[in-house]
Image (cartoon, helix red, strand yellow):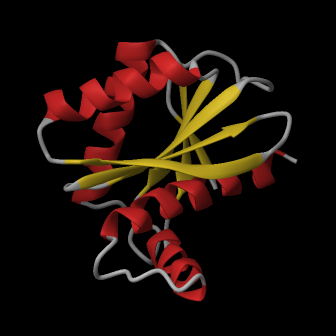
Amino acid sequence: MTVPLAAVPPVATSGTVLGFDFGAKRIGVAVGEHQVGLAHPLATIDGEDREHRFAAIDKLVAEWQPASLVLGLPLATDGSEHEMTRRARRFARQLQARYRIEVKFIDERYTSAAAEEQLRAQHVDLRRNKAAIDAAAAQIILQEYFDAAV
């Protein structure tokens, strides 16, 4: 489910897209290209400090020069919003203001569970590699965005 942010530019239909799985402790990041429509895990940004997070995102934006950004919107199982939903929306506003790049939301319910299942199937030790879960969840979020655009 795509939930547009108010007052953003028109939807980009080409160019690179960065996808984010926002969390209180880590942010997973994925990358993809509109025309190809495939998402790939890129990085996990550790830490709760806003300055540290945005310094890492600054580097990714400079390197990949995305046409748009996609952010997983955390919702309760019944679709209602909660504290993390509000925090994710605030993060989206910060992204939009800082980079002047369109931000789109994708419902992220169950993406972390799907990412864990996907990584277990690849025999990744999740106890030693929690960061992989966040990047894989960001990949799933971004892939769902591409799949919905078809």
The picture places residue 131, in percent across and down from the top left corner, at: 34, 62
Q: Dividing the picture into quarters, in which one does residue 141 lie? A: bottom right
Residue at image location 47% in from the left, 16% down from the top: 62
Q: Dividing the picture into quarters, in which one does residue 144 lie? A: bottom right
Residue 80: tell me if it is visible: no
The reply, left or right, for residue 94 in relation to residue 13 is left
Q: Nearer the viewer, residue 12 or 53?
A: 53
The reply, left or right, for residue 48 in relation to residue 3 is left
Work out which quarter of the rendered image holds the N terminus and state it.
bottom right
Total labels drawn: 0
Residue at image location 76% in from the left, 49% down from the top: 38
The picture places residue 35, in percent across and down from the top left corner, at: 85, 34
Q: Is residue 75 above or below residue 22?
A: below
Residue at image location 63% in from the left, 51% down from the top: 40
The picture places residue 102, in percent across and down from the top left corner, at: 56, 23
Residue at image location 69% in from the left, 18% down from the top: 10
The reply, left or right, for residue 40 in relation to residue 69 is right
Q: Nearer the viewer, residue 78 or 68?
A: 68
Residue 69: tell me if it is visible: yes
Q: Nearer the viewer, residue 90 or 129?
A: 129
The picture places residue 113, in percent across and down from the top left corner, at: 47, 80
